[in-house]
Amino acid sequence: MSNVHERLRRLLFLVPYVSKHPGVTVESLARALNISREDLLEELDLLTCVGRPPFNPDDYIDIYVDNDRVYVDLDQRLFAPPRLTAGEAAALAASAELLRPASGDALQSALQKLEHVLPPQVRERYREMYRKIDASTEAPQALGPLTRAILERREVMFGYASPGRAAEPRRVRPYELLSHRGQWYLQGFCHTRQDARLFRLDRMEDLTVTETPFLPPPDARADVPNPARSSSEASVRVRFSPVAAPYVKERFGQDARPLADGGVEVLVAGDSERWLTQWVLSFGGEAEVMEPVSARAAVARAARASIGL
Amino acid sequence: MDRTERILDLVALLLDAREPISWAELREHFPADYGGSDDAAERKFERDKAELVELGFPLTYVQGDDERRDGYIVDRDAYYLPEADLTKEELAVLYAAGSAALASGVFPGRDDLAHALRKIGFFAGESLPTPRVRMELGATQAGQEKEVSARLEQLWEACAARKWVEMSYASPKHPGTTQRKVDPYGLALRRGVWTLVGYCHLRGGLRTFHVHRVRELKANTARPRTPDFQVPEDFSLDNHVAYFPWQHRFHEPVEVVLRLSGALASRASGLFPGAVLETVAEGGVTLARLRVSFLDGLARFCLSLGADCVVEGPESARSRLREMAARVANRHADALEDKVSA
């Protein structure tokens, strides 16, 4: 898309925004438009030259900065932004799909209302473009109540099954939801464990949102779980056949060491035997643990167990 | 005059006009811009008009009659964004999803999405919810997001304008890259990976391409406003992309029955969404029936789930899982000191 187009879209939003928020600071206006302070001042300069013929003094947009705050006295009828374009509506609708079906009826009704405010000549084009992005993830049902609990700052309770153990009840302050490689996680403070924890949504049962409020910490960002890149020193050497090598190289990049037969070898963290075994098995015989022998034995045992030995 | 400035002037002029404005008048208003030969001036105005239409400016040309003269007119009511009256909950959903998609860095139509979020927030004042939903999409390695993001943006524009693209594609099934000319039909996200679905001129049929495997990409720039192809009426992205490894279309679908016990019994619906489930043995065991068009993909997944996941039938699926397990066991057999036969 050309720069002119991007700039026009920005400016046609800027004037109404200031009109609605007179005295908005330069900084928060720049943030609202996602541009730098310098770029914003340049845009304001340009706007003072905009007007309509015959270009008498009152025919120009009168927008100015006073004491680091922005005001508009004459908006030349730019008091509301333009309607959504087909592309904007389609991108918005497609992104909303990311939370389906968790968002339930709210999503459906929101999209209907949006479609309703599209200009009639744009509606068909919007429907056509909407069909061109399909971002429906397998969002679990728990996403809906958890999003609400995070927004409303209310504690949640659920049963949680750790690997190899039966589900036990947890009471948690939900901070953030995170999707990583198609897997959803909740990051929060667990009262049961008295510590920050990351929970997989697919291991939760009987989720309830309580009435107990809490105050979230200002920055509760979850670390991405990545068993392959743990900080642990104890590493496991895994070798892959030439068939699996391209897929492994895609994920590990330079860390995948090429072998003479066309395969590759990688070093991964060895602190979770369970994860390692699952991962090696998921290559269905195209992966082999080289060392340590304890990890080799764990994979062999798991494979034998699968065929009832 | 700068083009951005001229187009904004046109917006201001047309929004204020009570009467249609003729081309002759426009030329008088902007003598420096629409001066020169008739041809050049008209082409310039045509380009400006196209830009206005792209922005969603409802500009029409009316033929005059006794009452009215010929000229351009804008439907003001159709220009201004009205309040959509979104409830707090609806706004929260759109905001959480839209912001998460933007923050992920890897979503097609990022610019469009950013503008859309601003617009729907216009009437909401300061009460916009702060979303705490984060998603990592589309990149298989850290640091790859920027490249994937740029490819998605190009592909989104090509999909929207229906222009073919030329790309070099690195498939893990073949060494090196192949040059492809593709009519892009659409983009789909499955399990964190973006896939382009389109008609591949090299293979002469519909193909899917993982966007992170696209190395170079160039869209046809000739005649940007004229589409190069039509997308078939009955085309649906969902018919061409798989959610799970066993859904890749490598053979005719077969129905497979899995027996899930232990901790897996209660997780069946999450592990195999869409499968028909049946609880047996007083809740301790779940039978899952699912359609499979790639047995190897299913076998690998079942193997990784461990001994609590057993294939009940058909025999082809049972034996495939056994073969695979035996192969893994044998490659690691020295650690346990005995061999297994499949």
Image (cartoon, helix red, strand yellow):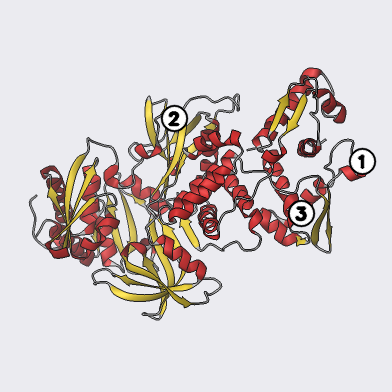
| Whole-number angstrom distance, CA of label 1 to CA of label 3 | 21 Å
Judging by the rendered image, the residue that carries numbered circle 2 is: B180
Q: Label 2 marks which chain's residue?
A: B
For label 2, the SS is: strand
| Image side of residue A24 versus residue B220, left or right | right
Q: Nearer the viewer, mark 2 or mark 3?
A: 3
Judging by the rendered image, the residue that carries numbered circle 1 is: A56
**Residue type indicated by callout 3:** Ser
| Whole-number angstrom distance, CA of label 2 to CA of label 1 | 56 Å
CB contact under 8 Å: marks 1 and 3: no
Q: Label 3 marks which chain's residue?
A: A
In the drawing, what numbered circle is on residue A19?
3
| Image side of residue B259 versus residue A167, left or right | left
Q: Quadrant of residue A124?
A: top right
Pointers 2 and 3 within a single chain: no
For label 3, the SS is: helix
For label 1, the SS is: loop
Q: Nearer the viewer, residue B313 or B182?
A: B313
Q: Residues within 10 Å of mark 3 (few under 14, many from 20)?
A: many
